[in-house]
Image (cartoon, helix red, strand yellow):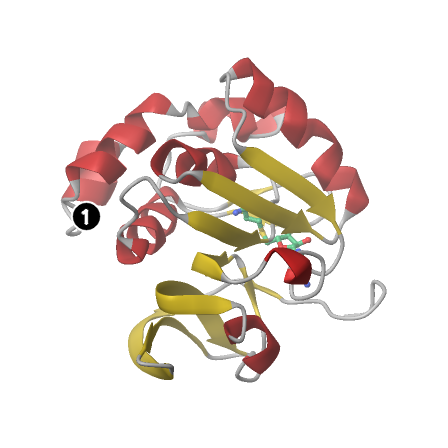
């Protein structure tokens, strides 16, 4: 999986590759899809949501350039697969999931991997960890259809965010805060579930 899908498409950061090797994706995939766990595609989760394609997890993680001392905000815990990889690379991960049923199993999976530097919360990720801001890195696995100002307010000086933005057409964006200003770079076209806002509305 790592050689053919990830290194071949340009993910070379040795720390990212090591983190990917150390987190077995099959642990995070519903039993029905275990045999496909190392395939080149997103997979369905229990509640009509998805676990991201391995390559997308890898490229988003690499974009954050984590060195080990960062506090990271993740939006859309889902299966917890991306959470586990971020936890291997940063000091602490604050991860929010709006769907309560999905969040329930994540903790036991992280425990199985002896990952302890994660704080999980159920709720809208734009809101729930606001009192822990600013964050050195932000990663969203759900796409707002417009520019997420309230989310980017939580990005620390010198920090990096990787976020999909858009509706039917979405692009991944890398956003950095440099001298107080947000500097944005458009990356590749992607397909993420929409970011939900409010109390469970679409
Ligand atoms: N990184 C996850 C992918 C999860 S898919 C994985 O590897 O498994 C995106 C997730 O974002 C879904 O579980 C969805 O329920 C969640 N989500 C959508 N809007 C959200 C919001 N506002 N706050 C937190 N989570 C949200």
Q: Viewed as shown, does residue 84 lie left or right of 110?
A: left
Residue 97 at x, y = what percent? Answer: 68, 49
Name the quadrant containing residue 33: top right
Question: Seen from this angle, which residue lies furthest right?
Answer: 199
Q: Residue at x 51, y 62 (%)?
A: 134
User: Depth check: 89 or 8 in front?
Assistant: 89
Residue denoted by label 1: 11
Residue 154 at x, y = what percent? Answer: 54, 68
Q: Residue at x 61, y 55 (%)?
A: 132
Q: Quadrant of the N terminus?
A: top left
Name the quadrant containing residue 2: top left
Q: Is residue 121 above or below residue 28?
A: below
User: Depth check: 85 or 69 in front?
Assistant: 69
Q: Is mark 1 within 8 Å of ligand 1?
A: no
Confirm whether residue 190 shows in the render.
Answer: no
Residue 72 at x, y = what percent? Answer: 47, 50
Q: Viewed as shown, does residue 144 lie left or right of 82?
A: right
Q: Residue at x 53, y 75 (%)?
A: 153
Residue 25 at x, y = what percent? Answer: 44, 28
User: Depth check: 47 or 198 in front?
Assistant: 198
Q: Viewed as shown, does residue 6 lie left or right of 26?
A: left
Q: Residues within 10 Å of mark 1 (few under 14, many from 20)?
A: many
Confirm whether residue 5 shows in the render.
Answer: yes
Q: Viewed as shown, does residue 22 lie left or right of 106?
A: left
Q: Secondary structure at mark 1?
A: loop
Q: Residue at x 35, y 42 (%)?
A: 69
Q: Is residue 48 above or below residue 189?
A: above
Q: Quadrant of the C terminus?
A: bottom right
């Amino acid at each position: 999986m790592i050689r053919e899908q990830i290194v071949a498409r340009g993910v070379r950061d040795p720390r990212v590759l090591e983190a990917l090797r150390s987190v077995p994706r099959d642990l995070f995939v519903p039993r029905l899809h275990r045999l496909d766990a190392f395939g080149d595609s997103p997979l369905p989760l229990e509640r009509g949501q998805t676990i991201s394609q391995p390559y997308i997890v890898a490229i988003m993680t690499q974009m954050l350039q984590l060195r080990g001392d960062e506090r990271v905000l993740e939006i859309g815990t889902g299966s917890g697969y991306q959470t586990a990889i971020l936890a291997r690379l940063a000091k602490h991960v604050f991860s929010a999931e709006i769907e309560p049923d999905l969040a329930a199993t994540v903790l036991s999976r992280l425990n199985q991997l002896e990952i302890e530097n994660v704080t999980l919360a159920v709720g809208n990720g734009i809101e729930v960890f606001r009192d822990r801001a600013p964050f050195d890195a932000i990663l969203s696995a759900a796409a707002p259809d417009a520019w997420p100002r309230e989310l980017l307010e939580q990005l620390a000086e010198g920090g990096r965010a990787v976020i999909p933005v858009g509706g039917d057409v979405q692009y991944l964006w890398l956003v950095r805060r440099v001298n107080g200003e947000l500097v944005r770079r458009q990356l590749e076209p992607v397909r993420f579930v929409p970011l939900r806002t409010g109390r469970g509305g679409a």
